[in-house]
Amino acid sequence: MANALWDTRAISYQGCAAQVFLFVCFVGAEFYVLTIMSYDRYVAICKPLHYGSLVGSRACAQMAAAAWGSGFLHAVLHTANLFSLPLCHGNALDQFFCEVPQILKLSCSDSDYFREVGFIAFSFCLGVVCFVFIVLSYIQILRVVLRMPSEHGRHKAFSTCLPHLAVVSLSISTATFAHLKPPFIYSAHLELVVSVLYSVVPPAVNPLIYSIKNQELKHALKKLFQLSSRSS
């Protein structure tokens, strides 16, 4: 974000490696956590009587540790493999941060390049598995919610799931467009805008989306708007 705002492109080799590691670690961990959250909502709505035994404090701690541990391990392997590539096409990235596809463009070793591409494909497959699990969870949730006789119960269930669905949809749609858009849709400015969309926007709006149900936040915002309208 600082590079984009101040129009600077200089970064050390160690700084670039650290940036790739942190980015891959946090993105991977977030997606694993979103997958766990879909399981949490599935149990809460479809098997409420078993919620305490299936999603207790110990189970939550174990799932969170597995998510962050997997993200950390994924980032270590990915970063170590990526920065073992010999770079012979200069050291200038056409991006405002050390993005993996841009670093791969500087590689001159075909064998190492395809090894990294294979690792990316494996990571993509893991993401697809998580996405399928989320979709199947919400199919089951939707089937149960639509059979609820109480309108209040349906509203409560939907209000529980909508913030999570909004974050999942925003994260997946922006990342998918960034990396799977057709080759003929290309421009340097579009690349920068898309990168900001999937790397900055989802984490920035997460607190707002997850706070939609927070009554204290709603009350504070309402009070703030009232004060601002009075002062103006």
Image (cartoon, helix red, strand yellow):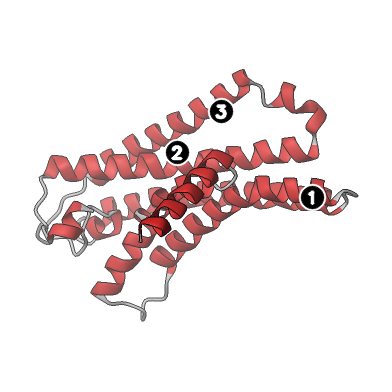
Q: Nearer the viewer, residue 194 or 156?
A: 156
Whether residue 102 sits left or right of residue 162 in the image: it is left
Q: How many other residues sit within 10 Å of disc 1, few (<14), some (14-19) or many (≥20)?
A: some
3 or 1: mark nearer the eye: 1
Q: Is residue 170 visible?
A: yes
Rounded to the nearest angstrom, the CA distance separating label 3 from label 1 is: 28 Å
Tell me the quarter of the picture where residue 27 sits.
top left
2 or 1: mark nearer the eye: 1
Q: Which numbered marker is on residue 154?
A: 1
Q: Amino acid at mark 1?
A: Arg
Q: Nearer the viewer, residue 125 or 188?
A: 188
Q: Which numbered marker is on residue 29?
A: 2
The vertical placement of 218 against 114, above or below, is above
Q: Label 3, secondary structure: give it.
A: helix
Check disc 3 and report the residue beneath it: 63
Q: Amino acid at mark 2?
A: Ala
Whether residue 91 sits left or right of residue 103 in the image: it is left
Whether residue 136 sits left or right of residue 69 in the image: it is right
